[in-house]
Image (tube, grey):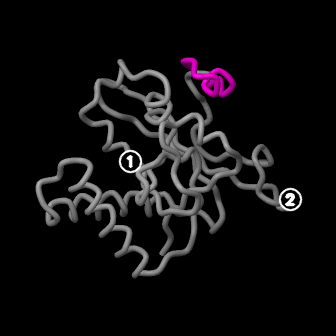
Amino acid sequence: MKLLRTIQLDASDSFVFDRAAVPGEWAVSGAFAFLNRDIPALRGKIRTAFRAGFLGVGSLGRSTLVQIVDATEQDHADVVELLAAQLVRKFGAPDLASAGEAAREEVAFAASLCDHPDGVIVAVTRSLEGGSIHEAFRSLRPAAQSPSRAFSFVEIVGEQDADEHLDLATLRKGGRP
């Protein structure tokens, strides 16, 4: 079994998101966090989280990138349990039973993104299309001859067209993208 873990190749997550995920924590897409939001009205860091952030299950922080890793059945059970508890505590799920079902579905979706070898890095791009959240995932394969560093990727698999330019320097200074 494989699941997603947050990865931080540089410090950018700490200034583009309100809360950055802890490197190495289990992750899910986390699009559900935006279901009751006025998405066109999102600005700044929350807009960046919508457009390009995976959800760290423990911290509820966002990560631009996640990595496919091997996981045990116990890891799977632990992440489902933790996410269910977070759904009750932070997202208003009525009880652990219904939250558990939603958490299992969310973790299963995350696992479905893991049909690549261990170590492959995954990025997400979200948009609002026809009133529904649309997610596109890209897998980034690091260059075989070098360690994984930011900007050392040689192959991108999946949707490659981004509809907007993200200006990290402006975000770091507190401006709007």
Q: Secondary structure at mark 2?
A: loop
Mark 1 vs 2: CB contact within 8 A: no
- Quarter of the image with the C terminus is top right
Please tell me which of labels 1 and 2 falls first in the chain: 1
Distance, label 1 to label 2, CA atoms, is 31 Å
> Which residue, as the protein is rendered here, is positioned at the far right?
145
Q: Name the amino acid, label 1.
A: Gly
Q: Residue at x 50, y 70 (%)?
A: 2
Q: Is residue 4 left or right of residue 148?
A: left
Tell me where residue 137 appears, x and y as whole percent: 52, 45
Report the residue marked by disc 1.
Answer: 30
Question: In the image, 130: left or right of 7?
Answer: left
Quarter of the image for residue 101 reads bottom left
Q: Amino acid at mark 2?
A: Ser
Q: How many marks?
A: 2
- Image coordinates of residue 158 in percent, x first then y, are 59, 44
Q: Which mark is residue 146?
A: 2
Instruction: Determine whether the residue tagged by mark 1 lies in a helix, strand or loop.
Output: loop
Q: Is 172 drawn above or below residue 116 in the view shown?
A: above
- Magenta-highlighted residues: 166-177
Compared across the picture, whether 151 is left or right of 50 comes to: right
Quarter location, residue 50? top left
User: Residue at the spot x=29%, y=57% of the render?
Assistant: 86
Q: Is residue 67 left or right of residue 141?
A: left
Q: Residue 173: say if magenta.
A: yes
Q: Position of residue 85 (x, y in %)?
A: 26, 62
